[in-house]
Amino acid sequence: KGRAVIHDRIAIDADLFVGLTKQRFGQRSGTIYELYQTGFGVTVVGADEKVRAESVDGLSSEILGLSPGMAVLRIKRVARTFDQKPVEFRISIVDSREFEYVSSMREHA
């Protein structure tokens, strides 16, 4: 409906993603993990998440168009590659009033 429902904060190891720029990230044609794989040879094979409800913070309330203090989901994710090495740490703030958060990460056989 033309409005943001997720605000992601992502931290990655700069040594694994040499040459990644804001422009390249924003102009990717697929998912973030597809960019990691095709652009940098880093394959994410799984992720662990922790989810809890909390009050939205100032920056996320602006981005998501929410009143300060409204309830949101906070999802902490650690994405890992084949050797279980962490390659991404992500915190997602989700406005789930009209949507469900669904996560399905599986290795393809």
Image: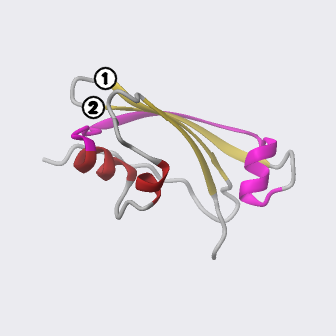
The residue at which mark 1 appears reads as 85
Answer few, some or many: residues within 10 Å of disc 2's Cα (few below 14, many 20 plus, some between 14 and 19). some
What's the residue at 86%, 54% (across, down)? 67
3D distance between C-alphas at marks 2 and 1: 5 Å
Q: Are marks 2 and 1 in contact (CB under 8 Å)?
A: yes
User: From which residue to which does the magenta span run?
Assistant: 40-66
Q: Image quadrant of residue 57?
A: top right
Is residue 82 within the magenta segment?
no
Is residue 48 within the magenta segment?
yes
The label number, if any, that marks residue 81 in the structure image: 2
The residue lying toward the viewer, choosing from 23 and 29, is: 23
What's the residue at 39%, 43% (across, down)? 20
From this view, report whether residue 4 is shown above or below residue 107. Answer: below
Q: Image quadrant of residue 59?
A: top right
Q: Position of residue 45 (x, y in %)?
A: 27, 38
Instruction: Give, as a three-letter code, the residue at label 2.
Output: Thr
Element type at mark 1: loop
